[in-house]
Amino acid sequence: MTTLTRRELWYFTGMLVLMGAGWGLTQPLTKIAVSTGYRHFGLIFWQLAIGAALMAVIGLMRGTRLPRARRQLGICLMVLVIGTVLPNSTSYQAAVHLPSGVLSLLLSMVPMWAFPIALALGLDRFSVRRLLGLGCGLAGVLLIALPGAEALNLPVFWVMIALISSLCYGLEGNLVAKTGTAGMDPFQVLYGASLMGAVLMLPVAVLSGQWIPPAAALTIEGQAHVLASVIHVLVYAGYVWLVGRAGAVFAVQVSYLVTGFGVLWAKMILGEAYAPGIWAAMALMFAGMYMVQPRPREALAAS
């Protein structure tokens, strides 16, 4: 783990909060984007196209080269399918039926799914503490989705569909850890995946009848999707920067903030209200995230 001075710690913590607020905001924006019938393939195309355009600009500033080798393109394709197309297809559909705050809660399962997948792939060792963390996360999900929990009034089927997103993200991270990135940094991987995805998803959006015309950007729903896509790229670039400066163990704490801000923004922007069971589920999931995340090997410097 990177050792930080007190001043650096405060600065990077501020950046962490800013990123958490930004990523958390994308959930209510997604809820707005799907509110009038825009479908997942059309939304995915524009997310990738906007992301690729922004990353092209950032890439020029960073001097980032596009992936070209066959193995690099294969990794970008894997990230595209498992890290964007599958999870976004399910989350966009689930967003039609579930409150935005609940979607944010379910996304907090990413590190908890990642643990058993890492064990299966031989990337991690068994830990009772992390197993208990997985149990807390699953208990939180059951508290939300258990059939018979009428007080929450949530469709169990769509809760299960929404969980596919966090499962995909947990799988994606482990597969990248297993296969490596063929010399690419995380920004290059996302840049290549977004550019490749925009090209591949264009005909899919058109042929599926889910094409969204550019004029839709003038509507509130279109503006919400554009804003969410821009935030995603900027925050992801910031996350890559923070990992390089403060270390991965510090940067991964953003997961708490994304969940918390996602629920907060949903209340403020969409006026969502939650039954006590939702707050209990959040407490369980936060406990689960705390237990499954790796411990730092060094203490932060106090100087």
Image (cartoon, grey):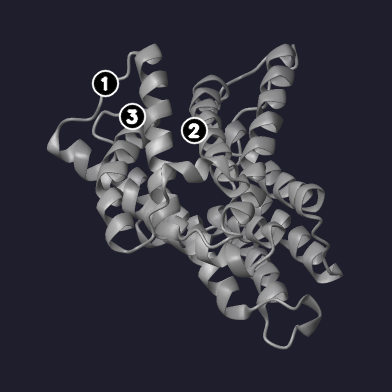
Residue nearer the viewer, 41 or 180: 41
- State the SS at label 2: helix
Q: Which residue is drawn at 37% across and 38% down?
A: 49
The amino acid beneath tag 3 is Gln
**Quadrant where the C terminus is found in the figure:** top right
Check the image and report above or below for 96 versus 203: below
Q: Residue at x 39, y 20 (%)?
A: 57
**Quadrant where the N terminus is found in the figure:** top right
Q: Which of marks 2 and 3 is nearer the N terminus?
A: 3
For label 2, the residue is 233
For label 3, the residue is 188
- State the SS at label 1: loop
Check the image and report above or below for 303 versus 88: above
Q: Which of marks 1 and 3 is nearer the N terminus?
A: 1
The amino acid beneath tag 1 is Arg
The amino acid beneath tag 2 is Val
Mark 2 closeness class: few <14, some 14–19, many ≥20 residues within 10 Å: many
For label 1, the residue is 65
